[in-house]
């Protein structure tokens, strides 16, 4: 059973006549044309998510990231030593390229434009370094009509008002584009597939194609990535089961996908389209949703550019009613991380068995959180550590993009949690307080480079994700799940440290604390952490590079480090 995650608030080219122009002018035009075509061809050779534009109107390029300069005026690195953990890092073995698609988030139409575009929200985006945003929502995307013309569809599956979504207070398409420009972000839009179920596939195709044209042509903002529908395999989703319609299956969706894809690419042939997949293969609900992915893949017929998975690692409610909260242990939650790599592997297996021609299609993780629903751990320190683990593990497992769910949601008074990074309607803290998960993104933004490199930890409860910056410095994110400090015993291959390091630390009094600290500065007593971050000094240390580096790491912490 999937809990509801969306909280709804009360021309032709001009013709030039070249007769009489000098030959050298014509040759210049021809050379320019060839040069442009060559550049476009070079860009087109890359898979989706491999390139990232410096600015939205720039051609995407290979992403590079320079390390922050070492600051001598930071706070001295002083943490207690604990048992040694051997950390082997091979800087010569690059596992993956890293870029901002790996650190995305979800935003929704219901955030309200005044809240969404508030300078405080914009600054929080910038300090976390989030530059990839999915919009306009999760499940509500399949009830969303971007132009306000809902074509007679007035009520959602949960009996909410559809026209409500495009009223003047809501975040509209142009508002979202403004947000992306203010934050220097790229976007991924989720088009309304279910309109093909309560309307027709032609209507859904027209709705999506006009949206592409509005953004990419009329507004001049290139939305390169699009999904067609959201979690359509599940009975909680609009269009999955409908009176007078056959049960929606992957094969049925795949046929409609082709029609909608053709219309969208007619509006802009450069866009990339994602198809909704499910990670398990089976006949029944909750196992494989009528073999959703296995029946989908052969029907795509080359129309999809990438595949989509979602991951909510734990369902912390009893299965009989789906309502009574079970309060999973911290060990249970940390123990779920393997599902990320498992699901990627299962999807690869289904591709091999059902459509091997798609082996090279990237997989985007466009929604994730520590659990399904607003349980307590969503706002506790453990989610800060867990989110840091997911971001690193997703890159390592081969996901091409990852988007946290979500930026703004709502505090759940029944279960005491909130899946969002910023607080809203939580009586214990001011609205817009940063939750622990926010700081995991801030760590990667500061301390992770553009190449993930090989790294091994001798202790399973100490996760280490290693990277290399463009200048050769190492960037590490270390998660210590233990209630006691640990000492990192580093062994480097292909890297000769110069004897300086700089770092940032997220921690708290225990894993289930709602209050957290950033570099020793605590957030409000009711929960969350401090802001702004850039005014809080970083940690720094100097060491003898001719001797092994032994570095103490705080208990219950996520730590970002640059080693120079």
Image: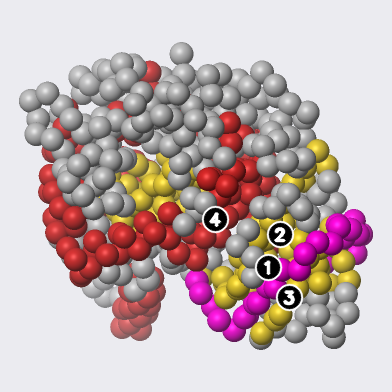
Up-down relation of residue 80 to residue 28 (above or below): above
Q: Earlier in the sequence, mark 2 or mark 4?
A: 4
Which residue occupies 25% across, 57% down? 304
Q: Is residue 34 left or right of residue 475?
A: left
Q: Which residue is mark 4?
A: 391
Answer whether residue 16 is visible to the viewer in this image.
Answer: no
Q: Is residue 278 left or right of residue 540?
A: left
Query: Which callout, 2 or 3, points to the residue nearer the camera?
Result: 3
Asked whether 109 falls inside the magenta stretch, the response is no
Residue 560's disc is: 2
Assess whether mark 1 and mark 2 are in contact (beta carbons under 8 angstroms). yes
Crowd tier of the residue under label 4, counting other residues whose Cα lies within 10 Å: few below 14, some 14–19, many 20 or above: many
Disc 2 is placed on an element classified as strand
Q: What whole-number distance in Å separates the C-alpha atoms at marks 4 and 1? A: 14 Å
Q: Which residue is mark 1?
A: 475
Query: Which callout, 3 or 1, points to the residue nearer the camera?
Result: 3
Disc 4 is placed on an element classified as helix
Answer whether residue 346 is visible to the viewer in this image.
Answer: yes
Q: What whole-number distance in Å separates the C-alpha atoms at marks 2 and 1? A: 7 Å
Asked whether 81 falls inside the magenta stretch, the response is yes
Q: Position of residue 490 (x, y in %)?
A: 73, 75
């Amino acid at each position: 059973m999937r809990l509801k995650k969306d909280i709804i608030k009360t021309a032709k080219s001009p013709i030039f006549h070249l007769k009489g122009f000098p030959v050298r002018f014509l040759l210049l035009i021809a050379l320019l044309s060839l040069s442009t075509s060559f550049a476009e061809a070079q860009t087109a050779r890359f898979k989706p998510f491999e390139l990232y534009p410096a600015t939205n109107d720039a051609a995407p390029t290979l992403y590079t990231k320079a390390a922050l300069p070492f600051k001598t005026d930071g706070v001295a690195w002083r943490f207690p030593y604990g048992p040694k953990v051997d950390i082997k890092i091979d800087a010569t073995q690059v596992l993956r390229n890293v870029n901002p698609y790996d650190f995305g988030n979800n935003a929704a139409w219901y955030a309200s434009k005044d809240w969404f575009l508030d300078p405080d929200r914009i600054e929080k985006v910038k300090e976390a370094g989030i530059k990839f945003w999915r919009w306009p929502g999760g499940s509500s995307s399949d009830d969303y009509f971007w132009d306000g013309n809902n074509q007679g569809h007035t009520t959602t599956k949960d009996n909410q008002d559809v026209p409500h979504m495009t009223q003047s207070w809501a975040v509209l398409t142009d508002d979202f584009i403004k947000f992306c420009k203010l934050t220097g972000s790229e976007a991924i839009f989720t088009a309304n597939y279910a309109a093909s179920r309560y309307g027709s596939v032609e209507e859904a195709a027209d709705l999506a194609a006009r949206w592409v044209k509005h953004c990419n042509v009329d507004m001049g903002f290139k939305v390169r990535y699009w999904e067609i529908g959201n979690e359509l395999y599940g009975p909680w989703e609009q269009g999955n089961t409908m009176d007078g319609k056959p049960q929606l299956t992957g094969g049925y969706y795949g046929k409609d996908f082709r029609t909608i894809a053709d219309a969208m690419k007619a509006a802009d042939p450069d866009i990339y389209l994602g198809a909704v997949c499910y990670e398990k293969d089976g006949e029944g609900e909750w196992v494989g949703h009528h073999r959703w992915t296995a029946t989908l893949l052969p029907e795509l017929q080359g129309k999809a550019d990438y595949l989509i998975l979602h991951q909510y690692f734990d369902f912390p409610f009893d299965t009989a009613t789906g309502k009574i909260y079970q309060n999973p242990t911290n060990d249970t939650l940390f123990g779920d991380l393997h599902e990320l790599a498992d699901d990627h592997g299962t999807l690869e297996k289904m591709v091999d068995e059902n459509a091997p021609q798609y082996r090279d299609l990237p997989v985007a993780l466009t929604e994730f959180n520590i659990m399904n629903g607003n349980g307590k751990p969503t706002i506790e320190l453990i989610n800060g550590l867990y989110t840091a683990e997911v971001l690193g593990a997703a890159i390592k497992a081969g996901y091409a993009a990852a988007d946290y769910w979500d930026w703004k949601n709502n505090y759940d008074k029944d279960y005491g949690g909130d899946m969002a990074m910023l607080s809203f309607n939580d009586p214990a803290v001011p609205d817009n307080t940063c939750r622990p998960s926010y700081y995991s993104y801030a760590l990667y933004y500061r301390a992770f480079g553009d190449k993930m490199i090989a790294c091994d930890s001798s202790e399973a409860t100490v996760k280490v994700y290693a990277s290399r910056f463009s200048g050769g410095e190492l960037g590490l994110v270390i998660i210590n799940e233990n209630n006691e400090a640990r000492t990192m015993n580093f062994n480097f291959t292909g890297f000769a440290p110069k004897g300086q390091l700089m770092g940032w630390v997220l921690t708290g009094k225990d894993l289930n604390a709602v209050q957290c600290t950033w570099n020793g500065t605590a957030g409000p007593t009711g929960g969350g952490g401090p802001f702004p971050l850039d005014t809080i000094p970083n940690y720094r240390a100097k060491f003898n590079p001719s001797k092994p580096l032994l570095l103490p790491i705080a208990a219950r912490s996520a730590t970002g480090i640059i080693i120079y």
